[in-house]
Amino acid sequence: MFEKVLVANRGEIAVRVMAACEELGIGTVAVYSDADRDAGHVEYADEAYNVGPAPASESYLDQEAIVDVAERAGADAIHPGYGFLAENAEFARHVESTDGVAWVGPPSDAMETLGEKTNARTVMQAAGVPVVPGTTEPVADADEVRALGEEYGYPIAIKAEGGGGGRGMKIVRSEAEVADALESAKREGEAYFGNDSVYVEKYLESPKHIEVQVLADRHGNVRHLGERDCSLQRRHQKVIEEAPSPALDDDLRAEIGEAARRGVSEAGYTNAGTVEFLVEDTVASKTQRADGEAVDGEFYFMEVNTRIQVEHTVSEEVTGIDIVRWQLRVAAGEKLAFDQDDVEIDGHAIEYRINAENPAADFAPTPGQLTTYRPPASIGVRLDHAVAQGDEIGGDYDSMIAKLIVSGDDRDHCLERSKRALEHFAVEGVHTTIPFHRLLLDDETFVAGEHTTTYLDRELDDDV
Ligand code: ADP
């Protein structure tokens, strides 16, 4: 096992990784920007090093500075968390080629293969996994896009090769919209991800977002830990995630899990990863089912996230498997110590992202000081955070304050506990998404588990 791990991240995920290190008897090294001198992750670590000014491009994204700290501190591995450099294959390669420092993540080659969305689609198809109808090569021009629109039927989505979180994705409802949409998808791809190549998919109007957590070791063992349902989204960004999905029956659940496993095996993947699917015609509507209407879910591969995800927590809660700990163990060469049959889903867990945003003002970030910060406690509540009362929530990084993860015997029980937990979550000084989550717990469609990825935007009357 490693002796000292550098965590190339900040906030709650840095603390989450350090907690796993601590349990394994591994020393921890934090890096921080000028804005984060007093941050929670710095306090938590055994040692901490400044890597530059507040802008992420000059600190948390500075590959040289981070590797340099690893060498100076004598760290024998780097864990990237999520965001920042986590899906950067070039950085992974840099770490892999640094003597005495291991990369806690998938091999850079597998990151490259699966990180490029069109490549990933080819790999999945080869593994017999259904993919969203679309191209496996970037598209050249508007004429080609129009031809594809004709072939798949509108609406279609033009998506940036490097995109994510709905950025660089444009929905096109008719031929007339193609030219403008192509331009802006390319522009966003270039601006956010430094890559203006785009591809085309059929746009599914109202699917469920279902993703499968996988873990793979270097000895050929690949396991999946069941699915998460991340269908509650605002402008294609996840707001609430849960496990298991209320929309899948056991057959579909097993089929999707198996497809995910097959797909990552094909790519020579190791470590933790997530295979994302869009699913249509699920048993999302329980009433439909009672009517005896046939609903056999169609699922389509969308993309692979080659890192630990924000919402890994809900899978941990229902499987009892510590995913971050396993990331460290398989990176150190250990074998996964459980079979697929050993993975059991027990109970239900929901994660609420508590962001410093004002739901009443289009979810605009509201930086400021946490004059009151009193999170809930007691049975069924897990809190992943790196803040305390009095802390400043700055404007330099994302607006997440905490992740509230609530567990229960089943979904109803979990929703009841969620009410209690959100009721007792007191934050003052900044606006938060807490009141919004409280409202959702009274929303019939959400409570019934019938929401799809476009539900919230339609309710909020946002652009869909
Ligand atoms: P991510 O944010 O997971 O990196 P994307 O930007 O590809 O990935 O997708 C984000 C969300 O956009 C999905 O969860 C889904 O709601 C929506 N989406 C992406 N592709 C499609 C599609 N072809 N049809 C319908 N919705 C899509």
Image (tube, helix red, strand yellow):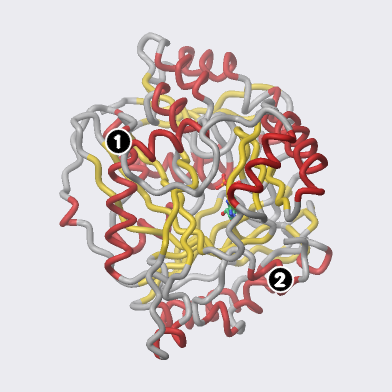
Q: Position of residue 34 (x, y in %)?
A: 71, 29
Q: Mark 1 = which residue?
A: 25
Give whichever of 205, 114 is nearer the camera. 205
Residue at image location 31% in from the left, 54% down from the top: 257
Mark 1 residue type: Gly
Q: Is residue 299 above or below residue 425?
A: above
Work out whether residue 182 or residue 63 is closer to the camera in this orientation and state it.
Answer: 182
- Residue designated by label 2: 458
Looking at the image, which residue is at 70% across and 66% down? 457
Quarter of the figure with the N terminus: top left
Give the image quarter of residue 164. top right
Instruction: Determine if the C-beta at disc 2 is less than 8 A from ligand 1.
Output: no
Label 2 to label 1: alpha-carbon separation: 49 Å
Q: In x, y percent, where is residue 127?
A: 31, 39
Q: Which mark is residue 68?
A: none
Residue at 44%, 42% (x, y): give it. 308
**Of 22 and 157, which appears nearest the observer?**
157
- Identify the mark nearer the N-term, 2 or 1: 1
Where residue 14 appears, as percent x and y from the top left, is: 51, 40
